[in-house]
Image: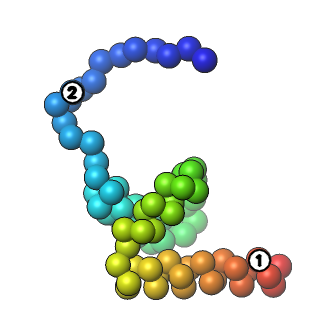
Amino acid sequence: MTVKMGSVHEPEAELLGVEDALGDVARLEEHVFQQPDRVVAVRVELSALIDALDQLNLDELRQVSQYVQKRLAAHTTA
């Protein structure tokens, strides 16, 4: 694998924190759900997903749970 070195547009900028990243995910989800015919695939390591889940509050966890339950039901009936 060859690594290409380049320049950074804002080298002093802070990296996104977990809350900022989760906010971005929420905004993307809203956009994607508003346009159900459009699909955007994002690959995330399972450990990163679990770490993100640890940052959610109870209401957010319930939303994730409902989504997962729907996905599981779709797979068991297929």
Viewer-side label of 2, 1: 2
Residue at 62% over, 84% down: 69
Residue 12 vertical placement versus 72 (above, below): above
- Quarter in which the C terminus is drawn: bottom right
Q: Is residue 35 left or right of residue 70?
A: left
Residue at 45% over, 68% down: 53
The amino acid type found where label 2 is placed reads Pro
Residue 73 vertical placement versus 13 (above, below): below
Q: Which residue is mark 1?
A: 75
Q: Residue furthest right?
A: 78
Residue at 28% over, 57% down: 20
Q: Residues within 10 Å of mark 1 (few under 14, many from 20)?
A: few
| Label 2 to label 1: alpha-carbon separation | 45 Å
Q: Secondary structure at mark 1?
A: helix
Q: Which mark is residue 11?
A: 2
Residue 14 vertical placement versus 41 (above, below): above
Q: Which mark is residue 42?
A: none
Q: Is residue 32 left or right of residue 10?
A: right
The amino acid type found where label 1 is placed reads His
Q: Is residue 2 visible?
A: yes
In the image, 47 versus 14, the foreground residue is: 47
Could you say where residue 33 lies in the image, as x and y percent from the top left? 48, 71
Residue 23 vertical placement versus 68 (above, below): above
- Quarter in which the N terminus is drawn: top right
Could you say where residue 48 lies in the image, as x and y percent from the top left? 49, 54
In the image, 73 versus 15, the foreground residue is: 15
Residue at 21% over, 40% down: 14
Could you say where residue 6 lies in the image, as x and y percent from the top left? 36, 16
Q: Is residue 40 visible?
A: no
Q: Secondary structure at mark 2?
A: loop
Q: Residues within 10 Å of mark 2 (few under 14, many from 20)?
A: few
